[in-house]
Image (cartoon, helix red, strand yellow):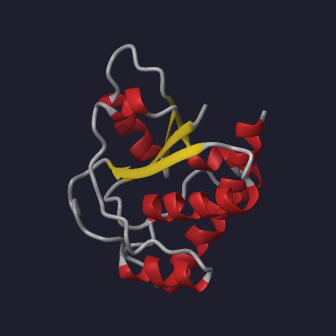
């Protein structure tokens, strides 16, 4: 049985597509024993249909991860029924997901960094208004949380 995971941030052009692409690649390399289906979405429709932020694409590409093919989309009510996990990049988006969630859904709503207890923080910071180092920090956090999530899925 496949584990279905949706990564969620606000606009779906920086953090959540980075999480989708990084998790997919780490699962391909290190979690071949797991069946996973991954996607990403945003809680706000600011960038629907757009590719990820070019700075995120460049930072990921430096680590051998392709994400330029992804396109932003909005979280849909069906996502709460289709996915096993909806993993928010920060508390604000987690609260938004809780408000959107339909009654009776079975999806687990959590912070992605719950899977990276060694990170020392709960939120993946939004790099949109910052410089290049913010995108590198997002990649570091997402890689750590991805490995933690793979370990949790194995249990």
The quarter in which the C terminus is drawn is: top right
Residue shown at the point (27%, 48%) measured from the top left: 74
Picture layout, residue 123 above or below residue 152: below
Picture layout, residue 16 above or below residue 13: above
136 sits to left or right of 12: right
Camera-nearest residue between 69 and 55: 69
Camera-nearest residue between 1 and 52: 1
Image position, residue 98 (x, y; %): 39, 30
Image position, residue 122 (x, y; %): 60, 50
50 sits to left or right of 103: left
The quarter in which the N terminus is drawn is: top right
Residue shown at the point (65%, 69%) measured from the top left: 140
Picture layout, residue 134 above or below residue 123: below
143 sits to left or right of 57: right
Residue shown at the point (22%, 59%) measured from the top left: 48
Residue shown at the point (36%, 35%) measured from the top left: 79
Picture layout, residue 47 above or below residue 64: above
Residue 120 visible in rendering:
no
Q: Residue furthest top?
A: 104
Image position, residue 52 (x, y; %): 36, 71
19 sits to left or right of 153: left
């Amino acid at each position: 049985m496949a584990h279905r995971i949706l990564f969620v941030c606000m606009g779906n052009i920086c953090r959540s597509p980075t999480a989708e692409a990084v998790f997919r690649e780490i699962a391909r390399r290190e979690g071949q024993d797991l069946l996973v289906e991954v996607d990403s979405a945003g809680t706000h429709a600011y960038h629907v249909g757009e590719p990820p932020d070019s700075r995120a694409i460049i930072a990921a590409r430096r680590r051998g991860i392709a994400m330029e093919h992804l396109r932003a989309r909005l979280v849909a009510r069906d996502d709460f029924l289709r996915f096993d996990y909806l993993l928010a990049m920060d508390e604000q988006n987690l609260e938004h997901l809780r408000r959107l969630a339909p009654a009776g859904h079975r999806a687990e709503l959590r912070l992605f960094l719950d899977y990276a207890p060694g990170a020392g923080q709960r939120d993946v910071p939004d790099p949109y208004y910052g410089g290049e180092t913010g995108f590198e920090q997002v990649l570091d956090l997402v890689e750590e949380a991805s490995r933690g999530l793979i370990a949790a899925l194995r249990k």
